[in-house]
Image (tube, rainbow, N blue to C red):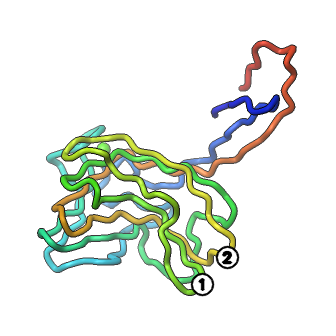
């Protein structure tokens, strides 16, 4: 829970439960949205893989990694399928905090994103998460609000053509519930439990 004072009001961010299963990437079943098992290729080449990696990790013993031949894309939805009419764990108008550790060689072409379907097309929501340097684990996070009119949504990991891998670990996804309280300036310290 995080609290911020804005214009005399205390804004409290109250995070819901983690909406990703196996986000620690330790299981031999891939990390995926809550209630899902498996992943769904959105873009792939026959030599592209998405596998648990026992040679590298950010925390624990394993990460999960997309490996692609140079010049090829690999993109997976972290859910067992991607119907055009399924919002999965997401709700229109709600804001989500997405966190992960990421590592890639060509970091500008690797990303973790929420995508949504609206007006009969899939779109990438906001600025996707991506590492800012090559071949180094980095914690990344962002807040994403599902727009009005969305009829489907999912979580996507992408490795694009000019690199050979993207690794992920420590995935977390929370709905942010925001409560605002009127702030009494006479109170010097407010304890929230
Ligand atoms: Ca791990």
Locate residue 73, reporting x and y percent: 24, 72
The residue positioned 76% from the left and 19% from the top of the image is: 190
For label 1, count other residues whose C-alpha is less than 10 Å away and answer few (under 14), some (14-19) or many (20+).
few
Could you tell me how many numbered marks the image carries?
A: 2
Question: Can you identify the residue that label 2 sits on?
Answer: 149
Which numbered disc covers residue 119?
A: 1
* Secondary structure under the numbered disc 1 in the rendered image: loop
The residue positioned 80% from the left and 38% from the top of the image is: 180
Side of 133 relative to 82 (left or right): left
Image vertical order of residue 168 relative to residue 14, above or below: below
Find residue 162 and report its image quarter: bottom left
The answer to which of marks 2 and 1 sits earlier in the sequence is 1
Image vertical order of residue 48 relative to residue 120, above or below: above
Whether residues under marks 2 and 1 lie with C-beta atoms below 8 angstroms apart, the answer is: yes
Locate residue 113, reporting x and y percent: 44, 61
Locate residue 74, reporting x and y percent: 26, 71
The quarter of the image holding the C terminus is top right
Side of 14 relative to 122 (left or right): right
Locate residue 1, reporting x and y percent: 64, 34
Tell which quarter ligand 1 is in: top left
Find residue 152 and report its image quarter: bottom right
């Amino acid at each position: 829970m995080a609290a911020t004072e804005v214009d005399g009001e205390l804004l409290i961010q109250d995070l819901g439960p983690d909406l990703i299963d196996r986000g620690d990437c330790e299981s031999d079943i891939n990390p995926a949205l809550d209630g899902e098992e498996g992943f769904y290729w959105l873009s792939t080449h026959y030599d592209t893989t998405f596998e648990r990696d026992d040679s590298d990790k950010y925390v624990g013993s394993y990460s999960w990694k997309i490996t692609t031949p140079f010049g090829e894309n690999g993109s997976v939805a972290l859910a067992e399928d991607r119907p055009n009419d399924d919002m999965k764990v997401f709700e229109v108008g709600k804001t989500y905090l997405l966190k992960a550790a990421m590592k890639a060689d060509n970091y500008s072409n690797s990303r973790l994103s929420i995508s949504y379907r609206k007006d009969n097309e899939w779109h990438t929501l906001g600025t996707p998460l991506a590492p800012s340097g090559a071949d180094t684990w980095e914690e990344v996070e962002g807040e994403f609000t599902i727009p009005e009119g969305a009829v489907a949504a999912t979580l996507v990991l992408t490795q694009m053509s000019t690199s050979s891998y993207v690794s992920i670990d420590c995935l977390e996804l929370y709905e942010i519930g925001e409560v605002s309280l009127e702030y009494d300036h006479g109170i010097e310290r407010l304890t929230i439990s």
